[in-house]
Image: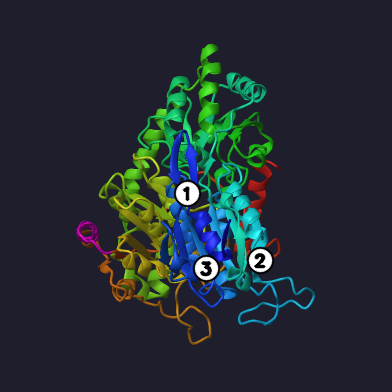
């Protein structure tokens, strides 16, 4: 038995947790991120100061940012290692809720310890306490409940034991991992208890592969055997199962084309002859053309988001069937599929044997190579796309005639696709690319190639603005020997870039690529393409009529980062980009390249539709037209 405070027991427990996957054992908890406040510093802070064990303490700058970094760290470690996060009560705790939702949507283990009010209630209302008159038991931390896989409150020292055991259960669950919130009443953090020694014994949590059931394998194999033009969609489950090579070998044997989701990208090598690339709303022409005609869609480790299915409109074959392989029974049931609840690698290996015994082959002849060749030509165009190449006439006229200063700023600028193409070809093959929101996920899902596995860290389950820089920092902590690049719009940079400072503090060099198109360009495209006016999506000052249509704001992002201690560059031409990218490789400190890109120069379309809520009644012809187009597409989509 050992008498210690709740916080001291928490630290000691975390330091003795391990995971085992395929027989390889690793320490599970690397350390703890924290922004100390009065609710945590005297309890958990004291424990970490006195005896942190082998846990490393990281000082975050923003609670949401540090939690994003922790989630990215876990993802880049294929969910085998984590960094816990702790905050004070009230606003500090609330700041992590967005990151908790992001982790849960993406099935990433994230362990959070927000401080809470006093269990004894003696000082109520304590500083930063959120009070509800209908229940004094409600605190800010109750807001975590909808966005976490597991939630608990430690209101007595002995609560800690069952809370942490259950936290580990969820954090190591391949099907239903996500955010775990263990709320710490701040007085209880400092209270002592005689904890049993067994609680602190080394625990090895085995992350086991789920074997497919024979009857479920038989069900999906029969459907595939009767198909002529199947398509396999590789999702995040392929990545976390480390099944990329298995999927490649399987598809080679039976001539099955492969498409990727955002989370599945880089599990299968981009150069593979059967890899068509990204599919769906942010997908490319090759994958989407094959998807439209597929008679069977094999979803492996995907939750079939609306971007993967183009709002259930992409798969147009009237007889198309869906089969799924997923560790999560909930996701396996998506699209009314015939399911196989199993680990991706094990299921594909066993499915391979069944199809081989039947000498199965698809009916594809030249279709796969033809669409890949067509997309390769489009990629060549995107790499050289400039202001003069098919720049939308209406947009060009609007910018030149209505707001000349826009053209003064951008007419000689790089296009976004030019810049991305050059960057991809001129960074290390094993460099890690991190992104999350805006138009960059669409361009990167289509254009980015990854021939080293697990080098594409795109948070697109929640598409959380602000993940990019924090995520790059987390990835660098996970793999310090690699270069890491954060692909970030100017809107996302303004939203959250606090952990850029932490990267300098930790001497963990990251490279931030800010694509400055003077606003929320992706949403500007969305509103205008649906007949809506240009409202609050470009960074403009208020004009003489009181509208946000005045002069464009010119922001020097390089100067802001230089103030933090980064090596910075401002880029407006290809020559400047070439110099900045090469010089940044020589630096040992974090870098930021402020790339001024031509607005409206991102990729778009490629035979996929996205369902958004368009006004069914409007006085504008443009909005009515958009609504009619939506109705047409909705009639083509699956109902469930």
Q: Residues within 10 Å of mark 2 (few under 14, many from 20)?
A: few
Describe the colour scheme in one phrase: rainbow
The residue that mark 3 highlights is 44
Q: Residue at x 40, y 67 (%)?
A: 499
Instruction: Give the label, 2 or 1, closer to the camera.
Output: 1
Residue 392: horizontal and vertical position, in percent? 42, 58
Q: Residues within 10 Å of mark 1 (few under 14, many from 20)?
A: many
Report the magenta stretch's main SS. Answer: helix
Instruction: Say whether disc 2 or disc 3 marks the residue closer to the N-terminus.
Output: 3
Tell me the quadrant of the picture where the C terminus can be found.
Answer: top right
Q: Residue at x 34, y 72 (%)?
A: 557
CA–CA distance in space, label 2 to label 1: 27 Å
Magenta span of residues? 577-589
Position of 252 relative to 9 (above/below): above
Residue 106: horizontal and vertical position, in percent? 55, 50
Residue 564: horizontal and vertical position, in percent? 32, 74
The residue that mark 2 highlights is 143
Residue nearer the viewer, 412 or 206: 206
Q: Secondary structure at mark 3?
A: helix
> Mark number for residue 28?
1
* Label 1 with label 3: CB-CB less than 8 Å: no
Q: Residue furthest right?
A: 134
- Using the rendered view, name the quadrant where residue 219 is placed: top right
């Amino acid at each position: 038995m050992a008498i210690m405070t709740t916080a001291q027991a928490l630290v000691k427990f975390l330091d003795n947790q391990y995971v085992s996957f395929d027989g390889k054992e690793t320490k599970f908890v690397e350390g703890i991120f924290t922004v100390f406040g009065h609710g945590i510093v005297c309890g958990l802070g004291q424990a970490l100061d006195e005896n942190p064990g082998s846990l490393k303490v990281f000082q975050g700058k923003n609670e949401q940012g540090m939690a994003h970094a922790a989630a990215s760290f876990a993802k880049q470690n294929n969910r085998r290692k984590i960094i816990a996060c702790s905050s004070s009560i009230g606003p500090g705790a609330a700041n992590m809720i967005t990151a908790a939702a992001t982790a849960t949507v993406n099935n990433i283990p994230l362990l959070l310890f927000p401080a809470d009010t006093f269990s004894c209630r003696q000082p109520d209302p304590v500083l930063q306490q959120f009070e509800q008159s209908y229940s004094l038991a409600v605190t800010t931390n109750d807001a975590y409940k909808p966005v976490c896989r597991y939630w608990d409150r430690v209101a007595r020292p002995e609560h800690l034991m069952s809370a942490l055991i259950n936290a580990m259960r969820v954090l190591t669950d391949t099907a239903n991992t996500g955010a775990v919130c263990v709320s710490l009443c701040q007085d209880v953090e400092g209270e002592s208890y005689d904890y049993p020694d067994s609680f602190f014994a080394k625990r090895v949590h085995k992350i086991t592969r789920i074997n497919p059931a024979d009857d479920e394998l038989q069900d999906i194999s029969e459907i595939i055997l009767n198909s002529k033009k199947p398509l396999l969609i590789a999702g995040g489950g392929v990545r976390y199962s480390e099944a990329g090579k298995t999927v490649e070998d399987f598809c080679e044997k039976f001539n099955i084309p492969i498409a990727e989701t955002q989370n599945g990208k880089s599990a299968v090598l981009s150069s593979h002859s059967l890899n068509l690339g990204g599919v769906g709303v942010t997908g490319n022409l090759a994958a989407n053309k094959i998807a439209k005609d597929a008679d069977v869609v094999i979803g492996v480790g995907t939750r079939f988001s609306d971007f993967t299915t183009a709002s259930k409109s992409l798969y147009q074959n009237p007889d198309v069937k869906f089969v799924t392989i997923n560790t999560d029974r909930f996701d396996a049931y998506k699209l009314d599929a015939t399911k196989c609840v199993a680990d991706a690698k094990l299921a594909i290996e066993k499915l391979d044997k069944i199809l081989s015994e039947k000498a199965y082959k698809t009916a594809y002849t030249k279709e796969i190579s033809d669409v890949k060749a067509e997309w390769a030509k489009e990629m060549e165009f995107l790499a050289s796309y400039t202001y003069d190449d098919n720049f939308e006439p209406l947009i060009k006229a609007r910018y030149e005639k209505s707001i000349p200063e826009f053209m003064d700023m951008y007419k000689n600028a790089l296009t976004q696709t030019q810049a991305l193409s050059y960057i991809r070809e001129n960074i290390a093959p094993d460099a890690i690319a991190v992104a999350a929101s805006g138009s960059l996920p669409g361009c990167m899902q289509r254009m980015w190639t990854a021939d080293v596995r697990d080098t594409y860290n795109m948070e697109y389950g929640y598409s959380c603005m602000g993940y990019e820089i924090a995520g790059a920092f987390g990835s660098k902590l996970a793999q310090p020997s690699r270069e890491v690049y954060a692909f970030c719009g100017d809107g996302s940079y303004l939203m959250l870039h606090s952990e850029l400072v932490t990267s300098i503090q930790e001497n963990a060099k990251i490279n931030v690529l800010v694509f400055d198109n003077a606003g929320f360009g992706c949403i500007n495209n969305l509103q205008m393409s649906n007949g809506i006016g240009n409202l609050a999506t470009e960074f403009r000052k208020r004009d003489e009529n009181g509208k946000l249509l005045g002069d464009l704001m010119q922001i020097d992002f390089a100067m802001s980062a230089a103030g933090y201690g980064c090596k910075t560059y401002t880029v407006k031409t290809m020559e400047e980009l070439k110099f900045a990218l090469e010089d940044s490789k020589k630096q040992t400190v974090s870098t930021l390249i402020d790339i001024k890109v031509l607005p409206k120069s991102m990729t778009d379309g490629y035979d996929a539709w996205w369902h958004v809520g368009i006004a069914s009644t409007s006085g504008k012809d443009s909005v009515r037209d958009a609504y009619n187009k939506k109705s047409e597409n909705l009639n083509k989509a699956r109902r469930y």
